[in-house]
Amino acid sequence: MTGGFSFHGANGDGFLPRSAPFGMVVGGSLSDGVEIRLHPSGSTLIEDVKVGTFVTIQGKRYRFFGVITDLELSTSDSGIRHSPPESDDPMLLEVLSGTMAYGVVSVMPSLALPLAGDGGEGPAAAKTVPSHFSPSFPATEDDVASVFGREDNQHFWIGSPLDMNTRVCLDLDNLVRRSFGVFGKSGTGKTFLTRLLLVGILQGGTASSLIFDMHSEYGWSGQDTDRNRHVKGLKQLFPSYVSTFTLDAESSRRRGSSADEVVSIGYGEIEPEDIELLKDNLSLSDVASVACFNLQQRFGGNWMSEFLARQGPETGDLADELGVNRAALGALHNRLSRFRRYPFLEEGNRHNAAARIIEHLERGKHVVLEFGRYGRDLNAYILVSNLLTRRIHERYVELKEEAEGGQGKDPRPLVIVIEEAHRFLNPAISSQTTFANIARELRKYNVTLMIIDQRPGGIDSEVMSQLGTRFTCALDNERDIDSVLAGAAGGRQLRVVLSRLEEKQQALVFGHAVPMPVVIHTREYGTPESYASLTGNVNLAPFEDTRPGESDAERLERQIDELFS
Amino acid sequence: MSQRVGEIIGADSRALTVQCYELYGAPPLGTFLSVGDPPAIAVVQSIRTEPLDPSRPVIARGRDARTLEDIYRENPQLERLLTTRLEALIVGHESGGKLAQLLPPVPPPIHAFVTVCPRDLVATFTENLEFTRFLLNSGPPMADEVMVACLREASTSREEGEAFLKRAGQILSREMVGDSARLSSILRRARL
């Protein structure tokens, strides 16, 4: 099956393109892409050619693969613009169309496959351009497969190229090796794409994922607001591979989700850095947020409980004692008192939610932390996700260092999924967050981030530049588009492609997990058939509930304990 | 049997001068002619009627005549004093039994017979439209008019005349880059 524009003829050769060319190279450059003039016969109408379509160009030494980045109506006679032919003469219009007035397609050649050789070489990044008059063809199913690989355990089918039924596959190893992002304005299918990616990571089997599920839509079930139906979450699809944690057991119960564990966090686990991160959301002054450090110095680990226990005038006395502005400390007390409304915050510091999560992750499980009603409270989301991530980060660093010292094995790679990422990773605060550290350097500690955001323009450019793969659904805001495309090869050309994405179920994918930028029609998710295809063709390794260093007898004993405890 | 219209009285590699046997007996502008044997193919690009003796200019004779026919009837010598000549542009020739849209190596000899190409030969010859280059490059002021006449004849020599004109237009558009108005004019008039 070929792309959306119509072609005739076949040469039957498996390597050469099997359809008629739609045009030939007439100009261009490596930096700006090549210009392909549509065939003068008019066999291909420019209206049938779409930006983002996957095409090939048959050079003399290489076969080039690229996407259409722009379309232009051109004329060999500038006079046509000023005095076009009479519109009541169809034959004249037909003669001029394709000859003096013709379509030019801009293509960014991303990959080149040598034509000579034993065929063992795959396509590599294009370092040259096709020569003049090279014919260009719509991509075939074989082309897509030769570029994106066939679906297997390491290649996850994420969608199809525009107007094709073939499968674009992601290289899962490359995907999780570096942080990656899913962007798009509200309602463009970020959540569905994310669900697919999470299934892919799960099927790949090389990494675990920890999802800070703000709106409780990945764990047990989610909403398809367009079709007004529920869709299954990871837990329903892969029950033995997914653990759900919840901050809001009541909400989980109401939604029919049986959370494996309820998360509680001790006040003693909250660090001043966590509050500093919330400075803007809590409308705290610099003085007030820095006062947390004074409080920690004064009271130690349990500073927050101690501080919140002070009432009225006691706060003023404490301010005098610490040498902090009274009004600032009063404001801090007032804001932090809001945390009393969170039932998941409890006294003490031995709740070890992070440790429990790590335990599940190390066992190869994928953990979804549902926020329930607290997902609507950004402070709760930022506080909990940052706090847990910091703990997990620390543990991974320890594990990795131990492994380097020969005292254990490498921790299982982990992908941490966060939503509303611009709240954590904006330039003002990103330097203080664990997330920015992970994005910047934690690849070496086997932890990467999956950032889901509708305002990528708000994310620190340094963090954005670290993203290995970017999936972007439709975006409107110029700043967001600039931010997503910053540093991408051919970013200027991709901008046109991105700006023309449909509002639903389409995404531009580029970066490490795909050999070349491609626009995909996202794979279906939410129908019984889609569930069957997502769970049916997978050769998942049987789940082994074994912890590192645990013998069979120890495992059995633990499992019995877990069953009856 | 093809109609013989005259013979060559002047020739060079590019164009031929033909004297017609009959006064006013020239085939229409744009007509394909077959000249000599093996034949060269030429297209009528201009026709003129003039005195046989250039030193005896034509004078007006019709002050008292009612019609043009009256003048010729009352001056029968005119048939002997006047002659019709035409200029034809060579656009191809037969070589080895095939028609080639190339100039013949040498022009046809003087007195070579000139006949009008039969319809089927015109249709065969004009399957290939390379010959239009000769017409376009023959230079103003008549080139476009001859092209129009020629295309009209070629299109009427076949059933799918409209498709032929479209194909011709597409070929011409390559030659007339940047001059869509001229191409439009030619195509419009070729279909009048």
Image: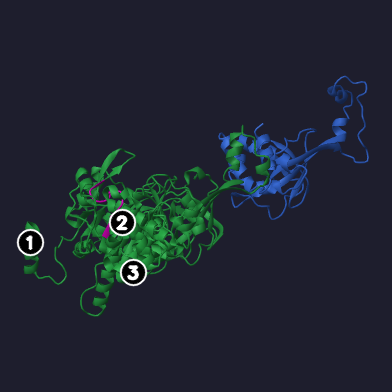
Instruction: Same chain for labels 2 and 3? Say yes or no.
Output: yes
Measured Cα–Cα span from mark 3 to mark 1 = 35 Å
The x, y position of residue B178, in whole percent, is: 67, 48
Whether residue A371 is visible, yes or no, is yes
Q: From the viewer's perspective, is A450 left or right of A94?
A: left
Tell me which chain the residue with mark 2 is part of.
A
Q: Which residue occupies 74% across, 48% down? A: B138
Chain identifier for the green-coloured part of the image: A
Q: Of discs 2 and 3, which sits in the foreground?
A: 2
Chain identifier for the blue-coloured part of the image: B
Nearer to me, A104 or B77? A104
- The type of residue carrying mark 1 is Asp
The x, y position of residue A301, in whole percent, is: 27, 67
| Residue to which mark 2 is pinned | A311
Is mark 2 in CB contact (under 8 Å) with mark 3? no
Nearer to me, A384 or A455? A384
Image quadrant for the N terminus of chain B?
Answer: top right
Measured Cα–Cα span from mark 1 to mark 2 = 44 Å
| Residue to which mark 1 is pinned | A561
Tell me which chain the residue with mark 1 is part of.
A
Q: Which residues are magenta?
A: A207-221
Q: From the viewer's perspective, is A241 left or right of A296?
A: left
- Residues packed near mark 1 inside 10 Å, few (<14), some (14 to 19) or many (20 plus): few
Tell me which chain the residue with mark 3 is part of.
A
Is mark 3 in CB contact (under 8 Å) with mark 1? no
Numbered mark located on residue B93 in the image: none
- Residues packed near mark 2 inside 10 Å, few (<14), some (14 to 19) or many (20 plus): few
